[in-house]
C-alpha cells in the first residue's frame, strides 16, 4: 500500500534528507580516500600483524606456519633465560628506554634554551636560527657520515685535534652511546627548536610587563610567564620526542650498527642495539620463520609506547579547578577569620561562592 | 637647576644615596619634566611632556590613538626607556629604576593575567614575588576579593572568567599591594558598553576607597570626563591642555580640544569676523562687545609670529646650504690637488657667508686661511669632523624650531583634515624609505603654514565654536541670544530625553541638542539662535583659542 | 547507538581477520610440477623459447666473467630454444628478497639462483628449492653425475639425499704477500705456520736493527718507490695486517683454523662443532701476535716472537694501505681481487715477467698456515666456500626445470672463463683440462694455481642453521681482535664458550618458535 503524506511533510522530509547528504556526503567525499588507504595501510597490516604474532610464521615456507596462540608473547615475557628473543628484546628495550630517559630531557631542554636565547633577538639572530635548524635539514645518513668522519679512530678529527686515541664507535658501549646521543641531539634539535620558538613568539608581551611590575625578573619571570605559556608546545615536544626515540634506528644503523659487542655474564649482546634495530635485524636476517615472533615484539613495543604516552597524557592533563579557596573565602566572610579554625563552620550548608 | 659637580663627585653622591636621587624641588607626587620619547626607528612619540601629579589625584591621559598617551604611561611604569627628561615618583628620580622598584601597580588593557594561575594566585602574585608571608597574602587577597566580589572565583583560572571578572582580577592584583601609584592602560576598552559604564564607577569608587594616586589612560573622552580629577589631553605626542573636566569642557584651548571633548563635539565653523559682526553665508550675527577688538589684536600678533616664522624658514633653507658643503667634502676626496684647492676655496667662501649670517657658526678668515695654507697635509678626516660639528649646531637649531612647529601643528589637527605631510607617530611600517631630514620636515610644515597664512592672513576669517547645547530655538531662549538664523533640520535623532538635530549651516553640519518641548521632524524649517556668552573664537590658522 | 557502532566494528574486524587468516594459512606447496616434456625424434627435449631468469649473488669484480660463461651458454643453446638472463642481486638483500619474491610475486621470481652453497640446506629445508635428480633423469643420455664434482663440494649441495644444487666453484680467502720485500731481505714466502712465524720474526729483527729494506707501492711518488732502511713505521713493525673488520679474515681464518687442527665445523644435527681445542690454541696465538707474548700449546712453549705481529689499531682501511707502504708484508683478502691487485702492483713496481728483479706482490693460500701440527693429514686442508646453481620452487613446468638443470650443468662444466675471477672449479674435468690450466688469459699460472689444491677444500657441512653456526664463529675472531676492554679481559676459552652457547641458544630458540 502506498504511504500517504502531506506535501509539506514530504518537503520537510526531503529537505532533511538533502541536508543529511550535504552534511555527511561531503565528509565521506573528503574522508573516503584517506579512510581507504588508512584501512589498507594501517588497519589491515595491524590486524595481519596481530594474527601473525599468534603464529609461528615463516615467509619462506608457509607449510611451516602454525597456530601458536599466545606462545610468542609468553616466550617474550617469561622465557628470559631460555630464549634469545626474549633476552634480546628486553636488552634492547632497556637500551632504548635508558637512552630515551637521557636524551628526551636533553632534546627538549637544549632547544628550549636556544629558543629562549633566539627569542631575545640578538644581533644576527636570523643567522643563528638558520644555523641551529641546519642540522635537521640533513638526512641521518648524511649527518651520520659527518659524525663518523669526526669520531673514527684512525682518521677522525676528534682524535686528531686532541691527540687522543679513543675508539669512539667500537671501543666501548659508553663512548658509542655518547656519539649516538650527540648525533641524535645535534641532528634532532631543529624540530623542537622550531616548535618552541613558535610558542615563545606567541607569548603575550604584556604578561612579561605585568611580571616586571609585580617584581619578577630574569629566571623567575621565565618560570612564571614563559614556561606556563609554552606548556602545550613543551608537551608536544615531549610527546613526539619520546615516541620518536622509541623508534631510534637510523643513527644507530649509520654509526655503530648496534656494535660493539658486549659480554654480560658470559652472554654476548650488541651493546648499542635499540629495539627498532633489533626488530629490523630480525626482519632483514635469514631466519625466515621468525616473523611471528617479530610481530609479537612489535605489538609489545606498541603497547609499551602506548602506556608511556597514556601515562604522559594523564600526568599533563588539565586539572579541574577545585573549590578549596572559595570555600575558605566563604568561611572568612561568615566569621571574618582566616585559617583552620575558620574552616569549622563550613559544616553548615554553605556551599561557598555565594557568601556575600 | 641642579648645581654642577664633577664626574667623580657625582658618582660618590650617587652611590652614597644608595642609587636613589631625591629631587628637592619637586612639586608633586609624580613629576614628569621635559620628557621626550624617540623610538629606535627615530620616530618621536612624545614631545616635551611636563606634568605634575598631586598625591591621591586621579589623572586621565586622553587622546586619539597614536597620540603618545600609552607611551607616556609606560615610561612612568618603567616599561619604556625615557629618551630625555626626568621622571620623579615620590620625589625619587625614577628614570633608571626598574619597574619593580618604583612601587607601582599597573592594570593592562589585555589584563595580562597569568593564565596558568588561579585567581587567588594571580591576585597574590605580586606579594608572593616580594616574599610576603603566606598568611598575610591570604588576608590581603581575601580582602581584595571581598572588595571586588571575587570570592566564588578564587579557585578558577582566568580563562574560566568573563571579561568583567578578569578586569576585576586585574584590579585586585593592582590593589592588593598597596602601591603608591596606580597606572591603568585603557583597562575598560575590552569590555562591552554596559559593563564599561559599571566598571567605570567601580574604579572611581575603588580609587576613593584606597586613595592611591592614579594615572589612567584612555581614548574615550567620556571616561576621561566622568572619572578624572584632572585631564591631560594629548595629540601627536604633545600635551594640548591640562585641566579639570569642567575647565576643559568650558574653556578648550584649541580646536583639537574643543572637538575632542564632548558628545556630540563642539560645532566649529568658519566665518568672517569684521566690524563686530559675524558674517556667515546664512546671515550675520552681532558679536558681543570686545570680541572684535580682541580679535584684531590677535591678528596683529599673528602677523608678527609669521614674520618670525619666515626667518625661521630662511634659517632652515640656509641649513640646506650647509648640507651642500657636506656633499662637496665627500667629493673632495676623489679630486687631485689642484682641483681640491679650487673646490676648497668654494667651501671656505660658503662657510664664511654662512658664518657671517648666523652667529652660531664660527668660521672667519683665519679659519679659512688655516685650512687653505695647510692644504698639503690636509687631513680630510679632521675637516670632516669640523664640518660635522657645524652641522650639529645647525641641527640643534632645527630641533628647537621643530618643537614650536609641532605644537602649532598638533593644535589644529582636527581643522586641517587633509593628509598631514609629517606624521611622526605612524612611520613604523616603512623603515626602508629614505628618511626625510628633520630640517626638510620642518621646512615642509613651515611652508604649509606660510601658504595658509598667505591665503588667510590678510582676511578676517576665524573659526567659531559653539557647543550643541548652546544652540537654542530662537523663541524659547531667554539669555544673551544672537539674531535668528533659519535652518532646515536635515536629520533628527531622538535620544530619549532630548533631540539631536543636524543642521546644514555655514557650509558644514551643525548639531544642536534640545529638550523634548517641541516635536521636530526631519525637514522641518526652524529658527535658531546661539547663546552668545558661550561662543568661542579660534584662530583660523593655528587653531588656538582667541576668545 | 554505541552498541551499533560496536557491532559494526566487530563485523569489520572479523572480516579483516578472516581475510588475513586465509592469506596467512595459504600453504601453497609448490610441488605441482606439470610434466609438459616433449621429445623430438632424436629423443632430445624440445624447448619452446624458454628463458631462464637467473639471480646471481656474484658481484663485482668477478661477475663479468660469469657473464662470459652465460653468453657462451646462450650461444650454444639458443638454437634449441633455451636462453638465460642473469640479474645480479646484492648479497645483503639476496636471500631475503628471494623468499619474499617467491611467495608474494611468483611471476617475477627467478627460476635459477646462483648463491653460496653453504646456505643451500637452509633453503632446501624451507622448500625454496627443487631437487634436481629427476630433471637430469628426464634427459636421455645425459652425462650428469654427482661424481663429476669434487665430493666435498658436491656434498654441500645435497640435502636429505637429494641433489638440490650443482656446484660451480670453491674458493677461500687469500694471503697477499709483499714478495719483493721478502726477497730483498733474503727471506722466503712461508708455506706453513712455523715458517710464517720465522719470517715474521726475521722481519721484526731486521727492522729493530734498522736493516729492514722496504719500499712503497706509490704510483705518484717515485722517491717512495726506492728501497730504504729507515725505521719510519713507529716503534713496532707489525708484518701482518689482521683486524676484526676484515670480512674475509673472519670468514675463512677461524674456520680453517678449526679444520687444520682436526676439528669439524658442524655436528650431525647441523649445530656448531667448532668449539675445539685447536681453535682455542690458534685464537690464543692470534692474541699473542697482538701483544708479542710467547705462545704455549698444552703448556709447552710453541712459539716465541721478536715483537708484535699485528697492530691492534688495524681496520678495513689499513688492509691495503699498510701493504702498499711496505709497513706490513701480509694481508688477507678475497681471491677475486688477485687480478686487479697484481695488475696494480706490477704496473707501479714492475714484475719479473717484464725483466724486473722482483714480483712485488705474491699470493699465499691458507694451507698449513694455522696448523699447530704441520704433519697431520688435515694440516693442509682449507675451509672452502662455493657457489652453486639451484632451481626455485616457482618453476612449475618440467620442461623449464630440465632447462634449468641443463643450464646448471653447462655452466659448471664450461666455466673456464669464470675462474679468471679467482675461483677454483668444482668440476673435476675442468681441473685437469688444458682450457683451465692453460687458459688464454694466463690466469692459472699468474694466480689461480696459488689458490690451493681443490681437493684440499673442506666445506661447512650441510646445516639448516648456517647463519647461527657461521656468524658466531666469525664473532669469535672479532672478539679476539676487538679493542674492547671487556673482551680483552676474557680468556679465549670464555670467548669461544660464550659464542658457541650463543649459537646453540639461537638454534634452540629458533626451533622453539
Image (cartoon, rainbow, N blue to C red):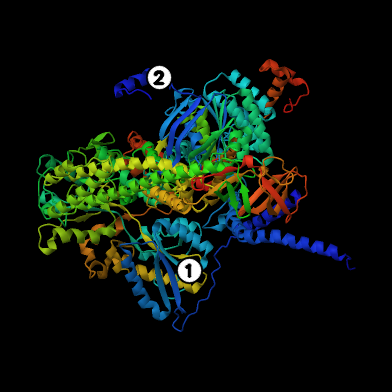
Report the residue at 59% width, 18% height from top.
Answer: B136
Q: Work out how far the residue at label 2 is from the one at label 1, CA to CA, in angstroms.
A: 108 Å
Q: Is residue C479 among what the camera can see?
A: no
Residue B390's place in the image compared with C331, above or below, is: above
Chain of the residue that carries numbered disc 1 in the rendered image = C
Give the quadrant of residue C293: top left
Report whether A303 appears left or right of B94: right
Nearer the observer, C442 or B529: B529
Report the residue at 14% width, 50% height from top.
Answer: C182
Tell me the SS state at disc 1. helix
Label 1, on which residue? Answer: C134
Q: Residues within 10 Å of mark 2 (few under 14, many from 20)?
A: few
Q: Which residue lies most toward the bottom here?
A: C41
Looking at the rendered image, the quarter that the N terminus of chain A falls into is: bottom right
Q: Are marks 2 and 1 in contact (CB under 8 Å)?
A: no
Q: Is residue C64 among what the camera can see?
A: yes
Report the residue at 61% width, 23% height from top.
Answer: B210
Give the quadrant of residue C142: bottom left
Residue B141: percent from left, percent from top: 62, 24
Q: Are marks 2 and 1 on the same chain?
A: no
Residue C449: percent from left, percent from top: 23, 61
Residue A42: percent from left, percent from top: 58, 54
Report whether B463 appears left or right of C369: right
Label 2, on which residue? Answer: B18
Chain of the residue that carries numbered disc 2 in the rendered image = B
Residue C153: image tag = none
Amino acid at each position: 500500500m502506498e504511504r500517504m503524506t502531506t506535501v509539506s511533510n514530504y518537503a520537510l522530509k526531503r529537505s532533511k534528507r538533502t541536508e543529511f547528504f550535504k552534511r555527511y556526503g561531503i565528509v565521506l567525499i573528503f574522508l573516503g580516500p584517506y579512510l581507504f588507504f588508512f584501512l589498507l595501510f594501517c588497519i589491515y597490516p595491524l590486524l595481519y600483524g596481530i594474527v601473525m604474532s599468534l603464529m609461528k610464521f615463516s615467509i619462506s615456507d608457509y607449510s611451516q606456519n602454525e597456530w601458536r596462540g599466545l606462545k610468542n608473547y609468553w616466550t617474550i615475557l617469561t622465557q628470559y633465560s631460555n630464549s634469545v628473543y626474549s633476552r634480546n628484546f628486553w636488552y634492547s628495550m632497556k637500551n632504548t628506554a635508558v637512552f630515551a630517559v637521557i636524551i628526551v630531557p636533553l632534546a627538549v631542554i637544549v632547544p628550549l634554551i636556544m629558543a629562549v636565547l633566539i627569542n631575545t633577538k640578538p644581533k644576527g639572530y636570523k643567522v643563528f636560527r638558520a644555523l641551529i635548524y641546519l642540522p635537521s635539514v640533513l638526512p641521518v645518513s648524511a649527518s651520520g657520515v659527518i659524525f663518523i668522519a669526526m669520531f673514527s679512530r684512525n682518521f677522525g678529527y676528534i682524535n686528531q685535534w686532541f691527540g687522543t686515541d679513543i675508539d669512539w664507535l667500537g671501543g666501548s658501549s659508553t663512548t658509542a652511546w655518547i656519539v649516538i646521543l650527540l648525533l641524535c641531539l645535534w641532528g634532532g634539535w631543529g624540530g623542537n627548536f622550531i616548535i618552541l620558538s613558535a610558542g615563545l613568539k606567541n607569548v603575550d608581551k604584556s604578561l612579561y610587563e605585568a611580571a616586571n611590575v609585580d617584581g619578577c625578573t630574569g629566571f623567575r619571570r621565565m618560570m612564571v610567564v614563559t614556561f606556563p605559556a609554552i606548556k602545550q608546545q613543551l608537551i608536544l615536544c615531549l610527546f613526539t620526542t619520546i615516541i620518536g626515540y622509541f623508534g631510534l634506528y637510523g643513527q644507530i644503523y649509520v654509526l655503530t650498527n648496534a656494535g660493539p659487542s658486549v659480554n654480560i655474564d658470559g652472554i654476548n649482546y650488541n651493546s648499542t642495539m635499540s629495539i627498532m634495530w633489533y626488530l629490523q635485524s630480525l626482519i632483514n636476517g635469514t631466519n625466515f620463520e621468525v616473523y611471528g615472533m617479530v610481530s609479537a615484539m612489535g605489538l609489545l613495543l606498541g603497547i609499551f609506547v602506548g602506556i608511556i604516552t597514556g601515562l604522559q597524557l594523564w600526568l599533563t592533563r588539565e586539572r579541574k579547578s577545585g573549590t578549596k579557596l572559595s570555600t575558605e573565602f566563604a568561611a572568612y566572610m561568615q566569621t571574618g577569620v582566616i585559617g583552620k579554625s575558620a574552616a569549622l563552620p563550613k559544616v553548615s550548608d554553605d556551599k561557598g561562592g555565594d557568601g556575600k | 637647576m641642579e648645581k654642577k659637580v664633577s664626574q667623580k663627585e657625582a658618582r660618590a653622591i650617587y652611590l652614597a644615596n644608595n642609587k636613589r636621587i631625591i629631587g628637592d624641588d619637586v612639586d608633586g607626587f609624580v613629576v614628569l619634566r621635559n620628557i621626550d620619547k624617540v623610538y629606535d626607528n627615530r620616530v618621536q612619540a612624545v614631545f616635551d611632556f611636563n606634568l605634575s601629579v598631586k598625591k591621591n589625584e586621579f589623572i586621565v591621559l586622553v587622546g586619539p590613538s597614536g597620540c603618545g598617551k600609552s607611551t607616556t604611561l609606560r615610561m612612568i611604569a618603567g616599561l619604556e626607556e625615557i629618551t630625555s627628561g626626568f621622571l620623579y615618583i615620590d620625589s625619587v628620580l625614577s628614570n633608571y629604576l626598574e619597574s619593580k622598584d618604583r612601587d607601582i601597580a599597573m592594570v593592562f588593557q589585555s589584563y595580562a593575567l597569568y593564565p596558568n594561575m588561579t585567581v587567588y594566585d594571580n591576585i597574590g602574585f605580586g606579594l608572593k614575588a616580594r616574599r610576603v608571608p603566606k598568611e598575610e597574602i591570604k588576608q590581603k587577597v581575601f580582602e581584595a576579593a571581598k572588595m571586588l566580589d571575587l570570592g566564588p572565583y578564587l579557585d578558577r583560572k582566568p580563562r574560566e572568567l568573563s571579561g568583567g571578572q578578569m578586569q576585576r582580577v586585574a584590579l585586585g592584583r593592582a590593589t592588593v599591594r598597596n602601591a603608591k601609584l596606580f597606572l591603568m592602560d585603557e583597562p575598560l576598552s575590552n569590555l562591552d558598553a554596559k559593563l564599561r559604564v559599571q566598571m567605570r564607577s567601580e574604579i572611581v569608587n575603588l580609587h576613593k576607597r584606597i586613595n592611591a594616586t592614579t594615572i589612567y589612560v584612555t581614548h574615550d573622552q567620556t571616561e576621561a570626563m566622568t572619572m578624572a580629577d584632572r585631564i591631560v589631553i594629548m595629540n601627536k605626542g604633545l600635551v594640548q591642555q591640562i585641566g579639570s573636566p569642567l575647565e576643559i569642557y568650558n574653556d578648550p584651548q584649541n580646536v583639537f580640544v574643543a572637538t575632542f571633548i564632548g558628545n556630540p563635539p563642539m560645532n566649529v565653523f568658519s566665518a568672517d569676523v569684521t566690524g563686530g559682526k559675524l558674517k556667515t553665508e546664512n546671515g550675520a550675527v552681532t558679536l558681543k562687545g570686545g570680541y572684535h577688538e580682541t580679535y584684531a589684536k590677535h591678528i596683529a600678533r599673528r602677523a608678527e609670529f609669521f614674520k618670525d616664522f619666515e626667518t625661521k624658514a630662511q634659517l632652515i633653507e640656509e641649513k640646506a646650504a650647509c648640507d651642500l658643503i657636506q656633499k662637496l667634502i665627500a667629493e673632495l676626496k676623489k679630486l687631485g690637488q689642484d682641483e681640491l684647492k679650487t673646490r676648497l676655496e668654494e667651501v671656505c667662501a660658503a662657510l664664511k657667508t654662512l658664518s657671517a649670517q648666523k652667529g652660531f657658526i664660527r668660521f672667519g678668515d683665519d679659519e679659512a686661511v688655516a685650512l687653505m695654507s695647510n692644504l698639503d697635509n690636509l687631513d680630510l678626516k679632521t675637516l670632516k669632523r669640523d664640518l660635522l660639528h657645524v652641522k650639529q649646531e645647525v641641527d640643534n637649531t632645527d630641533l628647537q624650531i621643530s618643537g614650536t612647529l609641532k605644537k602649532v601643528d598638533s593644535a589644529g589637527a582636527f581643522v586641517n583634515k587633509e593628509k598631514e605631510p609629517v606624521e611622526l607617530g605612524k612611520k613604523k611600517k616603512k623603515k626602508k624609505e629614505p628618511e626625510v631630514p628633520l630640517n626638510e620636515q620642518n621646512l615642509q610644515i613651515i611652508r604649509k603654514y606660510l601658504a595658509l597664512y598667505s591665503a588667510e592672513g590678510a582676511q578676517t576669517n576665524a573659526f567659531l565654536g559653539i557647543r550643541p547645547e548652546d544652540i537654542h530655538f530662537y523663541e524659547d531662549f531667554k539669555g544673551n541670544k544672537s539674531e535668528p538664523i533659519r535652518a532646515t533640520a536635515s536629520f533628527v535623532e531622538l535620544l530619549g530625553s532630548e533631540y539631536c538635530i543636524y543642521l546644514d549651516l555655514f557650509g558644514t553640519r551643525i548639531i544642536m541638542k534640545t529638550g523634548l518641548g517641541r516635536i521636530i521632524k526631519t525637514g522641518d524649517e526652524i529658527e535658531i539662535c546661539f547663546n552668545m556668552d558661550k561662543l568661542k573664537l579660534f584662530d583660523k590658522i593655528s587653531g588656538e583659542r582667541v576668545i | 547507538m554505541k552498541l551499533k557502532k560496536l557491532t559494526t566494528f566487530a563485523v569489520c574486524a572479523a572480516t579483516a581477520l578472516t581475510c588475513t587468516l586465509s592469506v596467512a594459512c595459504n600453504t601453497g606447496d609448490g610441488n605441482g610440477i606439470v610434466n609438459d616434456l616433449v621429445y623430438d625424434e632424436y629423443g632430445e627435449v624440445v624447448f619452446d623459447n624458454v628463458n631462464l631468469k637467473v639471480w646471481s649473488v656474484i658481484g663485482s669484480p668477478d661477475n663479468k666473467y660469469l657473464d662470459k660463461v652465460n653468453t657462451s651458454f646462450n650461444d650454444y643453446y639458443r638454437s634449441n630454444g633455451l636462453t638465460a638472463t642473469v640479474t645480479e642481486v646484492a648479497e645483503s638483500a639476496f636471500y631475503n628478497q628471494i623468499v619474499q619474491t617467491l611467495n608474494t610475486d611468483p611471476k617475477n621470481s627467478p627460476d635459477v639462483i646462483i648463491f653460496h652453497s653453504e646456505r643451500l640446506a637452509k633453503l632446501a629445508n624451507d622448500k625454496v628449492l627443487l631437487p634436481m635428480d629427476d630433471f637430469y633423469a628426464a634427459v636421455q643420455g645425459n652425462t650428469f653425475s654427482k661424481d663429476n664434482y669434487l665430493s666435498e663440494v658436491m656434498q654441500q649441495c645435497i640435502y636429505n639425499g637429494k641433489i638440490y644444487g650443482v656446484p660451480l666453484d670453491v674458493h677461500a680467502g687469500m694471503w697477499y704477500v709483499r714478495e719483493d720485500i721478502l726477497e730483498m731481505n733474503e727471506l722466503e714466502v712461508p708455506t706453513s705456520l712455523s715458517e710464517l712465524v720465522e719470517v715474521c720474526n726475521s722481519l721484526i729483527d731486521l727492522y729493530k736493527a734498522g736493516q729492514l729494506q722496504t719500499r712503497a707501492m706509490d704510483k705518484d711518488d717515485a722517491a717512495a718507490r726506492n728501497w730504504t732502511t729507515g725505521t719510519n713505521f713507529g716503534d713496532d713493525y707489525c708484518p701482518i695486517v689482521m683486524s676484526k673488520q676484515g670480512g674475509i679474515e673472519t670468514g675463512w681464518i677461524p674456520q680453517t683454523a678449526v679444520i687444520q687442527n682436526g676439528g669439524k665445523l658442524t655436528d650431525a644435527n647441523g649445530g656448531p662443532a667448532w668449539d675445539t681445542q685447536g681453535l682455542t690454541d690458534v685464537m690464543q696465538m692470534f692474541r699473542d701476535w697482538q701483544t708479542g707474548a710467547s705462545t704455549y700449546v698444552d703448556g709447552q712453549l710453541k712459539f716465541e716472537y721478536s715483537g708484535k705481529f699485528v697492530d691492534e689499531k688495524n681496520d678495513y682501511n689499513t688492509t691495503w694501505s699498510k701493504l702498499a707502504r711496505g709497513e706490513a708484508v701480509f694481508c688477507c683478502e678475497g681471491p677475486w681481487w688477485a687480478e686487479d691487485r697484481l695488475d696494480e702492483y706490477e704496473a707501479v713496481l714492475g714484475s719479473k715477467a717484464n725483466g724486473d728483479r722482483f714480483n712485488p706482490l705474491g699470493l699465499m693460500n691458507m694451507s698449513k698456515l694455522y696448523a699447530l701440527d704441520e704433519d697431520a693429514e688435515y694440516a693442509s686442508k682449507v675451509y672452502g666456500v662455493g657457489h652453486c646453481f639451484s632451481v626455485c620452487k616457482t618453476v612449475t613446468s618440467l620442461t623449464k626445470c630440465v632447462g634449468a638443470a641443463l643450464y646448471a650443468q653447462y655452466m659448471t662444466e664450461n666455466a673456464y672463463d669464470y675462474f679468471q675471477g679467482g675461483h677454483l672449479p668444482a668440476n673435476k674435468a675442468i681441473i685437469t683440462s688444458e682450457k683451465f690450466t692453460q687458459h688464454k688469459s694466463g690466469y692459472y699460472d699468474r694466480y689461480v694455481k696459488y689458490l690451493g689444491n681443490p681437493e684440499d677444500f673442506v666445506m661447512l657441512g650441510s646445516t639448516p642453521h648456517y647463519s647461527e653456526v657461521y656468524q658466531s664463529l666469525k664473532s669469535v675472531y672479532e672478539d679476539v681482535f676487538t679493542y674492547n676492554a671487556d673482551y680483552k679481559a676474557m680468556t679465549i676459552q670464555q670467548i669461544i664458550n660464550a659464542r658457541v652457547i650463543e649459537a646453540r641458544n639461537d638454534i634452540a630458540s629458533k626451533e622453539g618458535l
